[in-house]
Image (cartoon, helix red, strand yellow):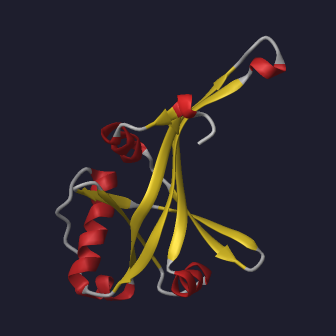
Amino acid sequence: MRRKDREVTDYKKMLEILEQCDCCRLGLNEEAGAYVVPLNFGYEDQDGQLTLYFHGAMEGKKMELIRQQGRAGFELDRNHALVMGETACAWSWKYQSIMGKGSLRILEDSEEKRHGLNRIMEHYSRKGAWAFPEQMVNCVCVLSLTVAEWSCKEH
């Protein structure tokens, strides 16, 4: 990280920033360049191992790339505020951001899928004990991303 003065290294604070984000952008590689898709997400931290969860359709470009690669980069950001100045170079932007990468897995087991869906629902609703009809669980794709590395920055 170039701006070490803006790096957030306290793990608890990193999780607090993650908790307050509402969109995770997943970055995948395709022949023509990067393919970035914004997704709803949930997460869990188990003894310092961060896992992100996503859901979506079972088919499509995103799923093709995930099946081919099995890994992705991700980005989240929040707390945006424009800082005005007297000169053009004095203008700035306040933010908090998270970037990282990890391995992706398509969850096949119904209980694993329910677990991931509950993490997503818990993230947005603050309630984690949701029931999901079997028919819905069978027709949705749930992904887990095991985070290999991530960093956090704020200004």
- Name the residue: 79% across, 11% down: 86
Apparent side of residue 142 relative to residue 5 in the rendered image (left or right): left
Residue 70 vertical placement versus 97 (above, below):
below
* Residue nearest the observer in this picture, 20 or 136: 20
Q: Quadrant of residue 13?
A: top left
* Residue nearest the observer in this picture, 92 or 50: 50
Q: Does any portion of residue 155 appear in the rendered image? A: no
Image quarter (top left, top right, bottom left or bottom right) of the N terminus: top right
Residue 69, horizontal then vertical, whole percent? 55, 82
Residue 104, horizontal then vertical, whole percent? 44, 75
- Name the residue: 63% across, 39% down: 2
Q: Does any portion of residue 16 appear in the rendered image? A: yes
Q: Quadrant of residue 135?
A: bottom left
Residue 138 vertical placement versus 20 (above, below):
below
* Residue nearest the observer in this picture, 129 or 104: 104
* Residue nearest the observer in this picture, 124 or 111: 111
Number of numbered labels in the structure image: 0
Q: Quadrant of residue 130?
A: bottom left
Apparent side of residue 2 relative to residue 127 in the rendered image (left or right): right
Image quarter (top left, top right, bottom left or bottom right) of the C terminus: top right
Q: Residue furthest right?
A: 88
Residue 99, horizontal then vertical, whole percent? 53, 52
Apparent side of residue 1 relative to residue 109 in the rendered image (left or right): right
Residue 119, horizontal then vertical, whole percent? 28, 62
Residue 106 vertical placement versus 78 (above, below):
below
- Name the residue: 28% across, 58% down: 44
- Name the residue: 47% across, 86% down: 58
Q: Residue furthest left?
A: 129
Residue 64 vertical placement versus 3 (above, below):
below
